[in-house]
């Protein structure tokens, strides 16, 4: 252990990690494999589920975790990015890992890595796996950070691979069409092990890659299905999940949005594929769907006026948000509190949501990947939007402005990035 890094706080460890590696995103498994080998961490004593996809990954992890906990299993899950605290990324039985538990893991990694440079994400992934091994979880669920094939979470051979959806995102790293992106995400598949594809219109390469690898593919609308059933009121509405062997009549997931049924159906297919290893009852599935939580996904932070938070940050997620706004219209105005990262398709997102937004309020994002306020303004100048576009120097000013002008029947929709949702929670004092 290097003396300079002893007795550091979690915040100090994280700040140091941000300076350790030359680039923020550096796909590849060689570095993390070498360090994992030194930590005797290349294999696990517990089943592992890996979740990839363009959107819906965090929701799927939340539902898997809640269902397994409802059955009584000890769970570990690893997600990214976080909204408020780094500890959100590593959870044990639904609760955030403590600072000291994470620091202890970081110390072990630093002692083992020698001169091998690790990225911020690689440090976190190894820390999560060390913690899960130390706490002897019954099942660990890892969310892929970017892509699949070369992502740090793909170092381990998962007992189950789950791919929630495929759409265009991170094109600089993954390619610019769905077939290419699907090949990258299919990298989490393993021979003779189940893989669940939850995309309602899956690229052909999902099936071809499963065949090439020898994975046991189960696809939505081919191997498993879901549909709404009759219900007089929202709290009585039910939906039916089925495959060739069984069916479940289920309550709506606690997570808002019709698209969550797609995620829930995908999760249940995964649960069923793992029944021999991790038996789960229908009762636990129902309870888990009711109890699952994923902050920042159509989260209502305040009701009147409504403040709606959503991490929608690409066209696919923007369509889902647009569908929600269309179905859940209000008498008043929709104000957008909006920003995005540079590597996202801002033009498409604006185009998809503009008809539902009466006024756009924009704020620049800090960091090398964030769009500045000037760049945001330039992006809007290229588009024809129906409402005014009002720039703000920071989120605190934007929040105060919106709180002053919004009426009880209005809605503020904060979206475009995890950083937007985090900034609203931290700055708006709702």
Image (cartoon, helix red, strand yellow):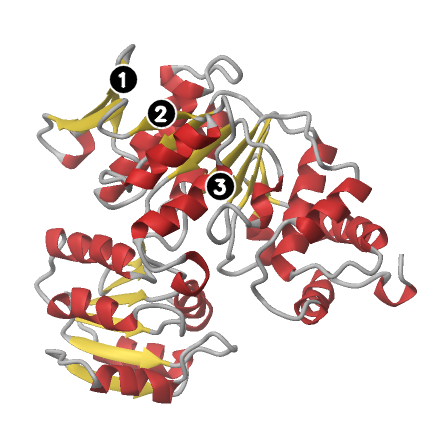
The numbered mark at residue 187 is 3
Question: Disc 2 on helix, strand or loop?
Answer: helix
Residue 248 visible in the displayed image: no
Residue 146, percent from left and from top = 48, 54
> Which numbered mark, 2 or 3, is in the foreground of this view?
3
Task: Quote the CA–CA distance across marks 2 and 1.
Answer: 8 Å
Task: Confirm or deny contact between disc 2 and disc 1 (CB under 8 A).
Answer: yes
Work out whether 216 lies above or below 408: above
Residue 84 visible in the displayed image: yes
What residue is at 68 percent from the left and 25 percent from the top?
45
Task: Quote the CA–CA distance across marks 1 and 3.
Answer: 25 Å
Q: Tell me the residue that label 2 is attached to.
A: 269
Task: Quote the CA–CA distance across marks 2 and 3.
Answer: 20 Å
Nearer to me, 141 or 233: 141
Q: Is 206 left or right of 387, judged from the image as shown?
A: right
What residue is at 26 percent from the left and 65 percent from the top?
413
Residue 407, percent from left and from top = 17, 72
Nearer to me, 405 or 22: 22
Q: Which sits earlier in the primary sequence, circle 1 or circle 3?
A: 3
The numbered mark at residue 106 is none
When asked about the image quadrant of residue 159, the answer is top right
Q: How many marks?
A: 3
Q: Which sits earlier in the primary sequence, circle 2 or circle 1?
A: 1
Q: Tell me the residue that label 1 is attached to.
A: 243
């Amino acid at each position: 252990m290097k003396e300079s890094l002893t007795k550091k706080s979690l915040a100090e460890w994280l700040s140091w990690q941000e300076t350790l590696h030359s680039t923020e995103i550096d796909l590849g498994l060689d570095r993390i494999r070498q360090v994992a080998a030194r930590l005797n961490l290349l294999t696990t004593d517990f089943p592992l589920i890996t979740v990839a996809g363009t959107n819906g990954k965090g929701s799927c992890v939340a539902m898997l975790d809640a269902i397994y906990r409802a059955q009584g299993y000890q769970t570990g899950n690893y997600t990214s990015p976080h909204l408020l605290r780094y500890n959100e990324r590593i959870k044990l039985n639904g609760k955030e890992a403590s600072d000291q538990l994470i620091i202890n893991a970081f110390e072990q990694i630093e002692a083992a890595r020698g001169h091998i440079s690790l990225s911020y994400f690689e440090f976190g992934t190894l820390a999560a796996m060390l913690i899960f091994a130390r706490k002897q979880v019954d099942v660990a669920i890892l969310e892929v950070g970017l892509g699949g094939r070369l992502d740090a979470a793909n170092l381990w051979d998962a007992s189950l691979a789950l791919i929630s959806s495929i759409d265009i995102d991170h094109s600089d790293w993954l390619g610019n069409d769905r077939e290419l992106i699907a090949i990258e995400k299919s990298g989490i598949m393993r021979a003779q092990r189940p893989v669940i594809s939850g995309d309602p219109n899956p690229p052909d390469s999902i099936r071809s890659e499963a065949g090439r690898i020898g994975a046991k593919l189960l696809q939505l609308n081919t191997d498993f299905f879901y549909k709404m059933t009759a219900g007089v009121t929202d709290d009585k509405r039910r939906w039916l999940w089925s495959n060739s062997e069984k069916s479940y009549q289920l309550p709506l997931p606690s997570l808002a949005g019709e698209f969550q049924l797609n995620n829930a159906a995908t999760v249940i297919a995964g649960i069923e594929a793992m029944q021999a290893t991790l038996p789960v009852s229908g009762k636990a599935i129902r309870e888990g769907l009711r109890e699952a939580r994923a902050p920042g996904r159509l989260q209502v932070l305040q009701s009147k006026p409504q403040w709606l938070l959503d991490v929608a940050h690409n066209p696919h997620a923007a369509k889902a948000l647009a569908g929600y706004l269309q179905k859940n219209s209000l008498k008043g105005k929709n104000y957008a509190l909006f920003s995005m990262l540079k590597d996202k398709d801002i033009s498409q997102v604006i185009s998809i949501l503009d008809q539902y937004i009466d006024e756009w309020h924009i704020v620049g994002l800090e960091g090398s990947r964030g769009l500045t306020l000037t760049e945001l303004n330039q992006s809007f100048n290229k588009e024809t939007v129906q409402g005014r576009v009002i720039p703000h120097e920071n989120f605190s000013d934007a929040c105060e402005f919106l709180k002053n002008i919004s009426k009880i029947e209005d809605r503020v929709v904060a979206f475009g990035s995890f950083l937007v949702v985090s900034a609203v929670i931290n700055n708006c004092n709702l």
